[in-house]
Image (cartoon, rainbow, N blue to C red):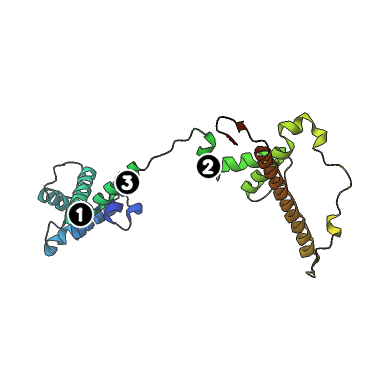
Amino acid sequence: MFKRRLKVLGYVECDKVNANDPQHFRKVVVWLEDQKIRRYDIRDRKELRDLKSENWPNVFSTYCKDVNCPVSGNALSQLEWLLGHAIWLEAENNSEEYSENVKEMKIKMKNEALVPRLISKNPLDNLNFDSNEFKTGTYSVAKLLRVPHHLNHLLSLKACSKLVQKRLNPECLQNPNSKIIRGKPFPVMNIVPGFQLNKPALENAAKILTLLYIQDIRNLQTKINEVIVRVQNITANPKTDTKLGKVGK
């Protein structure tokens, strides 16, 4: 709390302050008087600024009485009170600024309260997909499914998802032989891409991308055909309602 108050007040070395160190203690008191409290005139602060004086504890005791500090006997408690008093003075001197900030905060809280918050019952919505635990779990599943390791754990997860959908679905588990691809492997590296890159590595990558593109187009065409068949099943078998005197739904 001691360092937090100093940070709020803008004390530069707030993280390095040791209140049990007499020199640190005295520097903080002088800084509070010079920058925030300003109980004395500048010429009357001479004795308070003499940090090495043996009479400094008596000067500090007098200073506490002059600022009407209700705490006595414990120097640390007196310093705590001085910090709180400085914060109060700072807020009073900048009352307009603080009022505007409070007003903006209230408006923001009111607007946030008006926005409906959807509470999801799906536990997956509460997961942190970038946490170390999630990454470790993803790579463990990928290793179990023999999916190649990728630096991006989300891509590994996507590959696992595709494998589960295509090879571990109920239909595939009931009849595994129907889903296992058989036959002679396609000579991927022997196809002609139709262009030359003059670099074997780039040409091989281009061949693979070409085949993947063709596969995507084929899957798209299959889905289009399925939609056409479903639409035809609906339009080719209309229901007749004799009461309406027309054909159709």
Image quadrant occupied by the C terminus: top right
Q: Nearer the viewer, mark 3 or mark 1?
A: 3
In the image, which disc is placed on residue 128? 2
The image shows residue 205, relative to residue 240, as above or below, that is: below
Element carrying mark 3 = helix
Q: Neighbour class for label 2 at 10 Å: few (<14), some, many (≥20)?
A: few
Q: Is residue 50 visible?
A: no
Q: CA distance from mark 2 to mark 3?
A: 27 Å
Type of residue at label 2? Asn
What residue do we see at 53% from left, 42% from top?
128
Type of residue at label 3? Asn
Type of residue at label 1? Glu
Q: Nearer the viewer, mark 2 or mark 3?
A: 3
Lateral position of residue 166 relative to residue 66, left or right: right
What residue do we see at 89% from left, 47% from top?
184
Mark 3 — residue?
111
- The front one of 93 and 198 is 198
The image shows residue 175, relative to residue 226, as above or below, that is: above
Q: Is residue 42 visible?
A: yes
Q: Position of residue 223 (x, y in %)?
A: 69, 45
Element carrying mark 1 = helix
Q: Position of residue 169 (x, y in %)?
A: 71, 34
Q: Nearer the viewer, mark 1 or mark 2?
A: 2
What residue do we see at 17% from left, 41% from top?
73
Q: Residue furthest front?
A: 245
Image quadrant occupied by the N terminus: top left
The image shows residue 190, relative to residue 1, as above or below, that is: below
